[in-house]
Image: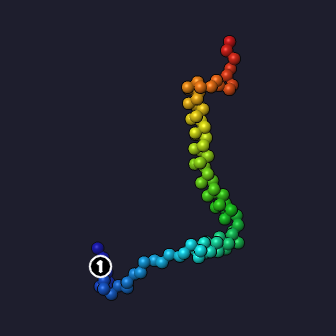
Amino acid sequence: MSQPRHPAELSPKREPPRRLALKPYARAVAQVLRVSFRASPAAVVMKVVGSLISALLPLVTTYFAALTTTALAAAYAATRPPANRPLST
């Protein structure tokens, strides 16, 4: 195991990292977005579209799974007749 090259008492004291307030943080993020969009608009648009798809896909999947489960439960319980029932011979 390697030993430090100098005693611990000579190490500089570390201060906890400071955090930006919300307004300067939002301003900095907006500035970065502006510069990124000027440099490559297609990349920024694709990143936003990808983020939206990643956020919405689980919600849409859950919605359709709930619809399917509800329809299957209703069909199994026979609470209502099926909409497209074939004619019996």
> Quadrant of the rendered structure where residue 8 is?
bottom left
Instruction: Work out whether residue 32 can be spotted.
Output: no
* Residue at (60, 37) in percent of width and height: 67
- 68 or 35, which lies in front? 68
Work out whether 81 lies above or below 42: above
Judged left or right of residue 85, residue 3 is: left
Work out whether 21 lies above or below 88: below
Q: Quadrant of the N terminus?
A: bottom left
* Residue at (63, 56) in percent of width and height: 52
Q: Around disc 1, counting alpha carbons within 10 Å, would you say few (fewer than 14), some (14 to 19), or many (20 or more)?
A: few
- 71 or 48, which lies in front? 71
Instruction: Work out whether residue 74 can be spotted.
Output: yes
Could you say where residue 47 lies in the image, as x and y percent from the top left? 64, 61
* Residue at (29, 79) in percent of width and height: 3
* Residue at (58, 29) in percent of width and height: 74
Work out whether 30 lies above or below 79: below
Could you say where residue 66 lies in the image, as x and y percent from the top left? 58, 39
Hey, what amino acid is under mark 1?
Answer: Gln
Question: Seen from this angle, which residue lies furthest top?
Answer: 89
> Quadrant of the rendered structure where residue 88 is?
top right
Work out whether 26 lies above or below 13: above
Could you say where residue 49 lies in the image, as x and y percent from the top left? 66, 57
